[in-house]
């Protein structure tokens, strides 16, 4: 009897957690799975959405995929891929790519792509400088949005000036500008991103054909050692650690001491303390405008909102400085390795034509690649933090007027519902009646809070639907690590050897240590020196904790995922794209990470 092929659950077979059905329907209809979706392959995007999404936070998926699709499909006309569809079930975001397979259509789109992308490549520096100006202007616009206020009486100055527009009007105006700016930001985000990956992918494909034995990691190391804004926040923390030692106040920075207590102590230290506090302010603006996650959740606050993460890194950096150890990112070593690899493989090419093509491709890849990480500072972090804090202001105003119990409750309303709540408040303020939605919104918030807690405790299938024969979207392979081989490995997890987990060899090195399974940003502070971080995904803003850990393992990610890139830049052994390492590895177990082969081995039981 033939063996039934293994498959992931169909979307229609995934039950909504009991008692959360109403919360599931809160997400707009276009985010819900339908019967037609059973015919497609989907995978859980734990790279960007590792935790259940509140209904408001889903705007981060909505705006991003709307802009990504427009960039791929309509603006740059990528030849073999269109946009990404997304669905949500039990708070988890699943995505599926729309590929182009018809040769005639690929040829037609290629002609368009060349006219568009090649212009960007030829004018990259000028257009990128222009992009930076646009992003900084957008950030300034967000910072300039007026504070939200509903006074008992309109100020006399407004009346005597004949303004003719009452304060309640500006609530809706500000809200609409807030949303417009956020959706616009995501279009800026993708203006260069796919072109940056595209230049690398062309070089990658050339290398795979010219050097059949070359590994993905080796090719990735040919663009390592770059400078980008997203690394600057960690550099500022290191600078502050050096200044603390130079000023003789390093003893004030101890593990476990709250930032407010450190700041209060420094205020009493005279000139040295005041000098360090001035240095802190110089670092905070703008470099602490990074959040502790990847920019997709309202509660992943920025370092400026909560200094805990950078301050938790200072004692470790200070200790290493005292010991005479280097705390620098190994850029010089990475650049030297990069050049040695580039030169070595170039020497293997047989003809001048091949060498000329190789030179052009690697030169372009190295020119454009820093953007792949650098843009994150401006988009997912600085701007997104401004966006969520402005929404938080709306929550505070609604709470002040009785529509919500607290400012954070606003994130359990969809952005459509929030607009209705704002109009309700505008109306009630104008006519003197109480708001109509007081009971309604409290009930919705309560049931959705409860649903998020239920969903957070559930295991999530890494993929849904039929397994495709071929994964031909290069971005899905490079970023998320979704390959046919990986999918087969996920389906047969633990069958060959229950103690062996396979993924992408992201960053070389072999390390043994205690696994620390971190499923949420709030658990980062559990990491101890020498631990092996096991997570759904990591990102550049966790860089200050990399001084503690010995290696990293993630559920999702390919050779060019942010987790893989950051691990290489910090010389940290890493295996990414394992599928279910956070499920199969228990917190406290001893494991071996082989970042050169992409293998994680469970060595023993949980340590006492």
Image (cartoon, rainbow, N blue to C red):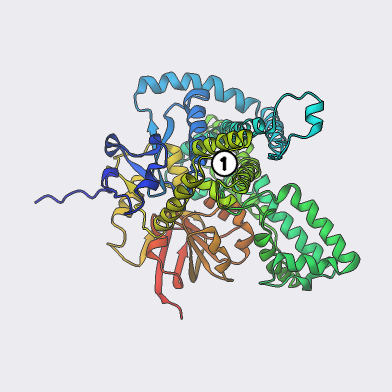
Query: Residue at the location (46% across, 26% down)?
Result: 73
Q: Position of residue 568 (x, y in %)?
A: 57, 54
Q: Which residue is mark 1?
A: 434
| Residue in the image at 54% along x and 58% along y | 521
For the question of whether residue 575 can be seen, the reply is yes
Q: Eyeballing the image, is 142 above or below 554?
A: above
Of residues 199 and 21, the one nearer the viewer is 21
Of residues 257 and 83, the one drawn nearer to the viewer in this rendering: 257
Where is residue 224 drawn, in percent x and y? 60, 48
Q: Which residue is situated farthest in the front direction here? A: 432
- Report the side of 472 relative to 267 (left or right): left
> Can you name the residue that lies furthest to the bottom here?
608
Residues 166 and 459: in front is 166
Q: Position of residue 258 (x, y in %)?
A: 69, 68
Q: Which residue: 49% across, 32% down?
A: 66
Neighbours of disc 1 within 10 Å: few (<14), some (14-19), many (20+): some
């Amino acid at each position: 009897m033939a063996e039934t092929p293994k498959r992931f659950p169909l979307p229609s077979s995934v039950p909504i957690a009991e008692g959360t059905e109403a919360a599931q329907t809160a997400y707009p209809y276009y985010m819900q799975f339908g019967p037609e979706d059973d015919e497609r392959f989907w995978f859980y995007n734990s790279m960007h959405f590792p935790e259940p999404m509140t209904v408001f936070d889903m705007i981060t998926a909505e705006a991003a995929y709307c802009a990504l699709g427009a960039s791929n499909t309509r603006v740059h006309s990528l030849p073999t891929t269109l946009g990404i569809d997304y669905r949500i079930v039990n708070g988890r975001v699943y995505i599926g790519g729309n590929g182009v397979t018809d040769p005639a259509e690929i040829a037609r789109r290629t002609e368009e792509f060349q006219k568009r992308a090649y212009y960007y490549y030829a004018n990259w520096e000028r257009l990128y400088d222009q992009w930076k100006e646009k992003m900084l202007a957008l950030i300034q616009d967000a910072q300039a949005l007026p504070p939200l206020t509903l006074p008992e009486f309109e100020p006399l100055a407004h009346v005597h000036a004949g303004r003719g527009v009452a304060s309640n009007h500006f609530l809706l105006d500000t809200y609409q500008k807030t949303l417009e700016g956020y959706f616009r930001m995501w279009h800026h985000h993708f203006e260069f991103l796919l072109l940056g990956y595209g230049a690398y992918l062309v070089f990658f494909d050339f290398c795979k054909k010219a050097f059949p034995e070359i590994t993905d990691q080796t090719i990735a190391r040919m663009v390592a050692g770059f400078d980008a804004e997203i690394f600057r926040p960690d550099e500022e923390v290191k600078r502050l650690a050096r200044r603390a030692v130079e000023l003789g106040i390093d003893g004030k920075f101890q593990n476990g001491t709250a930032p407010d207590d450190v700041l209060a102590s420094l205020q009493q230290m005279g000139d040295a303390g005041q000098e360090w506090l001035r240095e802190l302010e110089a670092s905070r603006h703008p470099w602490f405008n990074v959040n502790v996650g990847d920019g997709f959740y309202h509660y992943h606050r920025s370092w400026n909102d909560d200094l805990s993460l950078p301050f938790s890194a200072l004692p470790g950096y200070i200790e290493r400085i005292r010991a005479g150890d280097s705390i620098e990112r190994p850029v010089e070593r990475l650049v030297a390795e990069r050049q040695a690899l580039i030169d070595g493989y170039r020497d293997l090419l047989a003809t001048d034509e091949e060498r000329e093509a190789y030179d052009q491709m690697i030169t372009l890849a190295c020119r454009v690649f820093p953007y792949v990480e650098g843009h994150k500072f401006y988009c997912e972090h600085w701007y997104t933090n401004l966006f969520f804090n402005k929404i938080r202001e709306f929550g505070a105003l609604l709470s002040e007027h009785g529509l919500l119990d607290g400012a954070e409750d606003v994130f359990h309303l969809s952005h459509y519902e929030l607009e209705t709540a704002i109009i309700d408040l505008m109306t009630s303020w104008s006519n003197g009646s109480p708001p109509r939605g007081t009971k309604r919104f409290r009930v919705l918030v309560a049931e959705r809070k409860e649903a998020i807690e239920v969903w957070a405790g559930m295991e999530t299938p890494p993929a849904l639907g039929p397994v495709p024969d071929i994964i031909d979207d290069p971005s899905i392979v490079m970023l998320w690590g979704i390959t046919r081989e990986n999918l087969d490995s996920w389906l047969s997890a633990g069958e060959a050897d229950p103690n062996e987990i396979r993924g992408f060899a992201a960053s070389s090195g072999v390390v043994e240590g205690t696994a620390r399974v971190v499923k949420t940003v709030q658990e980062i502070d559990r990491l101890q020196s020498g631990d092996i971080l096991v997570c759904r995904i990591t990102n550049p803003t966790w860089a200050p904790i990399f001084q503690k850990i010995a290696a990293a393992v993630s559920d999702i990610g390919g050779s060019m995922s942010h987790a893989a890139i950051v691990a290489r830049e910090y010389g940290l052994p890493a295996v990414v794209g394992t599928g279910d390492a956070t499920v199969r590895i228990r917190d406290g177990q001893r494991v071996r990470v082989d970042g050169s082969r992409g293998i994680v081995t469970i060595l023993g039981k949980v340590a006492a």
